[in-house]
Amino acid sequence: MRIKGNILLVLALFFILLPTLKAQEVRGYPWFDAATLRCYYSQQWDSLINYGNSALKEGHDYYFLNARMGVAWFEKGNYKKAATYFKRALKYNGQDPFASEYLFWSLKMTGQVNDANAALRHQSDSLMRKLGAKSLIKLAYVYAEMGTILTNANKGLDSRDLDGTLNVYGEYDLPDNGYYFQAGGGFSLGRLGQVYLGYQNLTQERYHRVRFDDIDTLRHSYNVEQNSFYASVPLVITPGLRVVPSGHLVLQKYSPIAVSYVPSADSFVFRRNKVERKEWALGLGVQADLGTFTTSAHLNWTELGLNHQMIVGGAITWYPQGNLNSWLRMHVANLSEENDNRIIYEPSFGLKATSWLWLEGSCSFGDLTHYSSEELYVLFNKFETAGNRYSLALHFPVMPSALLSLRASMMDYNSTLLEYKVNNASQLIEPSFEKLDFLQYSIIGAIRWNF
């Protein structure tokens, strides 16, 4: 009886463990291939992804598995992950039009038009024509923006007594309102990338006031005009990897009245100066896509405010949904100027609020004096010391080919008031500087038209 009981126990354990043993035997390449193929045809995308992840974890990595995983993520709207799997599929078959076409659309759905064209480098011209991706150099889009610049720098100063009971001389030269305009176009280089060429004009009024012995000796307004020419050339090494050289040339001119107070003679010297300055900025950046993350690094050389600057920075952008519906970005840069090093932090975000409205916000924390943005599009080269910056933009896609934008920005600045005071102890006239904080606001409207 004891022997029969042991035999029955062994048989029972065998039949209990048989399904597990059988599953372990068959869950190899044929099983995963059949399971993912079945899910592909029945459009069970979540199950396909689960089976595909298990297969890759067990070392089963091949063309069809990656292509099916790419389609699954594409159908779920995660175009970033879809692009990752189509790139892996093309490593096994670089000439395959199926994965190339899907990769093209995955990149285009995330705004990477240049990379999308580069995904068709090994495909026929007929496929490019079918997808609307021409290999010839052509105008891809035009862009224009304009707006006003407002500041409270002079608020309350126009009636201020700059030379009080002990003051003999007071002076300030501060920015006032102005306007900004920019226009340019992006030219497609086919499968190589793109070039953007733009022209910018910034004109801002400044107000100069000098007060001597309770009398305003000078009240003078003059314009600072800045014309600049910008170029950026994102070159696609391979889809998802870009090298971006850029350059910015600034021509600045203004005609202030220079005032010199000579305490020993108790008099002024006035002269009008015509100033023309040429400033420049050169940069080189590298951008790489890593699934739902995009990373970048850059090096900028600039000459702003008669000083040379070198800026080294990097950024990481996270797309939680794998598309452009939302993103978070952090950019950090180190600015070196005349042996002075400053760290600047720039967090930003983007969010699709509705089908017709996108939100974009950004901040810049640190000393932004003579700072240049990552791709040199914006140069902070004013006379005053620049501080933190805050910006919010609204984007409205009014039609498939047109995008309207409205951006509002606020930035901290500080300058100084110069006063000559009589020292009670020595009875000498000495200069005194008072720090003045003020804000600058800008409201910019823009349109981009794609061809």
Image (spheres, rainbow, N blue to C red):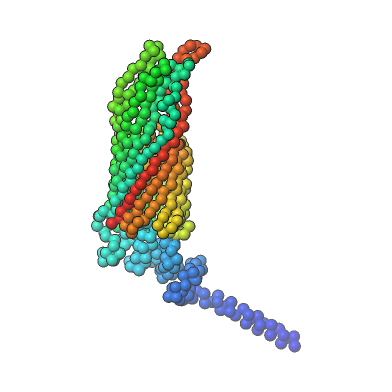
Identified at 48% across, 57% down, the residue is: 320
Q: In which quarter of the image is the C terminus?
A: bottom left
Q: Residue 282 at x, y = what percent?
A: 34, 41
- Residue farthest toward the right in the current orientation of the protein: 1
Name the quadrant containing residue 258.
top left
Q: In this view, does 16 lie above or below 387?
A: below
Q: Which sits in the foreground, 47 or 338?
A: 47
Q: Residue at x 26, y 60 (%)?
A: 134
Q: Which residue lies furthest to the front in this view?
A: 159
Q: Give the camera-side residue of 310 and 47.
A: 47
- Position of residue 292 relative to residue 315, above or below, is below
- In percent of the image, x 37 and y 38: which residue is there? 149
| On screen, residue 409 above or below 278 | below
Residue 376 visible, this angle: no
Dividing the image into 4 quarters, which one contains the N terminus? bottom right
Percent coordinates x, y for residue 59 in the rendering: 49, 67
